[in-house]
Image (spheres, grey):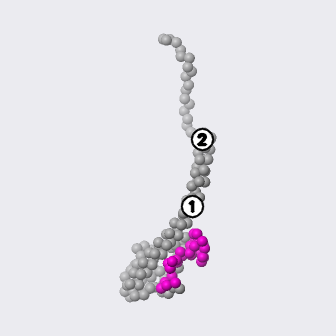
Amino acid sequence: MPGSVSARPIYRRRSRLGFTLVEMLVVMVILALLAALVGPRIFPKLGKGKQSAAKAQIELLGQALDHYRLDVGHLPTTQEGLKALVVNSGVEKWDGPYLKKELPNDPWGKPYIYQSPGTHGEYDLFSYGRDGSPGGDGEDEDVVSWK
């Protein structure tokens, strides 16, 4: 009908410039629930990852020691240590460096322990794990070359 005014009220949308406090609280509660559910499943795997990395590094250091022995005719002594894989200390037939990068520390930031002759074989190469002392379980467990 021409000229008549509609009975419907006209609503104006108010522009929203931000989030309300309730919306922020809901998002925070959802994030907290996700962290509570997912966190305990992820964090134990971090320790296993460091154990696996230490085993892989010990294996690579063992291969470098084998190459050293093939070239020189013997393994480095305990006093020469693993540094003999990177720096020649006057050894004849040394054809290194036997590592592509610097000598690595274990995943917990401590140097690997090398003994030659070893008590478990020609050499012992190991890390004491996260706690830095012999024995332990989980991430504190020793990572050794002879097992």
Q: Quick one: label 1, few (<14), some, or many (20+) residues within 10 Å?
A: few
On the rendered structure, is 34 left or right of 88?
right
What label does residue 17 carry, if any?
none
* Foreground disc of the pair 2, 1: 1
Residue 130 placed where, x, y %?
Answer: 58, 71
The residue that label 2 is drawn on is 23
| Amino acid on which the number 1 mark rests in the picture | Phe
Can residue 115 be seen? no
Q: Residue at x 55, y 59 (%)?
A: 42
Task: Tell me where residue 14 appears, x and y as whole percent.
Answer: 56, 30
Q: Is residue 52 above or below residue 89?
A: above
Quarter assignment of residue 87: bottom left
Marks 2 & 1, CB-CB < 8 Å contact? no
The relative height of residue 108 versus residue 16 in the rendered view (above or below) is below
Amino acid type of the residue tagged 2 in the rendering: Glu
| Residue 7: image location, x then y, percent | 56, 17
Instruction: Write down the residue under mark 1.
Output: 43
Q: Residue at x 41, y 84 (%)?
A: 69
Q: Is residue 5 above or below residue 73?
A: above
For residue 34, above or below residue 54 = above
The residue positioned 40% from the left and 74% from the top of the image is 100
Magenta region, main secondary structure: loop
Who's the residue at 45% across and 77% down the image?
61
For marks 2 and 1, the one nearer the N-term is: 2
| Measured Cα–Cα span from mark 2 to mark 1 | 29 Å
Is 45 magenta? The answer is no
Residue 98 visible (yes or no): yes
Magenta stretch: residue 142 in it? yes
Q: Position of residue 71 (x, y in %)?
A: 37, 84
Mark 2, Cα crowd under 10 Å, few <14 / some 14-19 / many 20+, is: few
* Label 2 element class: helix
Magenta segment boundaries in residue numbering: 120-147
